[in-house]
Image (tube, rainbow, N blue to C red):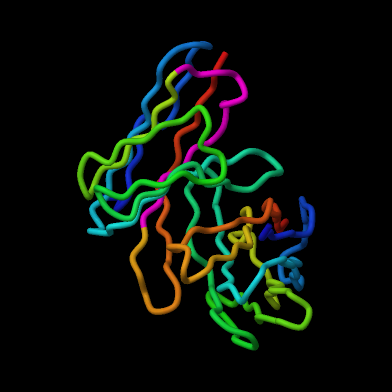
Amino acid sequence: GDSVTQMEGPVTLSEEAFLTINCTYTATGYPSLFWYVQYPGEGLQLLLKATKADDKGSNKGFEATYRKETTSFHLEKGSVQVSDSAVYFCALSFYNQGGKLIFGQGTELSVKP
Amino acid sequence: DADVTQTPRNRITKTGKRIMLECSQTKGHDRMYWYRQDPGLGLRLIYYSFDVKDINKGEISDGYSVSRQAQAKFSLSLESAIPNQTALYFCATSERQGPTDTQYFGPGTRLTVL
């Protein structure tokens, strides 16, 4: 079945470090891809998305590019801040399946001053 | 005010009890979802509803039931709670936006079954 795999956490970085969180997917067809972020004590919120191959999603300094050839959607940020500490979820969905999301297991990021 | 609200925010109950978790939204969306979050497993879909008369099972619906009382309200019930239903439960809403939906999540309900 369709699935999403993320790199295991927790990831601990110093402020201003470069961030990469790996995400790969297995799917029959061409899904839309998402990154959601969950700040402590809150629900998830959409960070960015991409709907087709080679699309780049970006928001708040974060970027991810939909790579069909490697079935990947890695999240990157050039300079993290303490306020970026959160759990990040990669997810996919299909247009003809009513927007149901299939999530990866989540990666916890902790940024130290 | 929050667009998607969940009540209660925390609940501790005992094995065998019936529990209802409630979700309300003011976004005017037709689509609503219930997920559970477990450490190391991400979020998994329990039930989803495209409108008041359209309710569908998700990946892990066994042991749960739902009711869509109105466009704005979607409740999740555990008829007889068991300890492995201890988890963080999220409600979400969405609307069709081109090729994708964006889902909007509530703050979650932390349920502990003793």
* Residue sitting at the far bottom: A54
Position in image of residue B112 (x %, y %): 54, 22
Q: Quadrant of residue A93?
A: bottom right
The mark tally for this picture is 0
Q: Residue at x 69, y 74 (%)?
A: A73
Find residue B94 and report its horizontal and vertical position in percent. Answer: 36, 61
Question: Residue at coordinates 70% horizontally, 78% vertically from top-left?
Answer: A78
Q: Which residues are magenta?
A: B80-93
Nearest the camera: B49 or A87?
B49
Tell whether B109 sits left or right of B27: right
Q: Residue at x 44, y 44 (%)?
A: B47
Q: Is residue A18 above or below residue B92?
A: below
- Point 40% across, 57% down: residue: B104
Whether residue B85 is in magenta: the answer is yes
Q: Position of residue A47 (x, y in %)?
A: 53, 68
> Which quadrant of the rendered structure holds the C terminus of chain B?
top right
Residue A103 versus residue A74 in the image, above or below: above
In the rendered image, residue B90 lying in the magenta stretch gets the answer yes
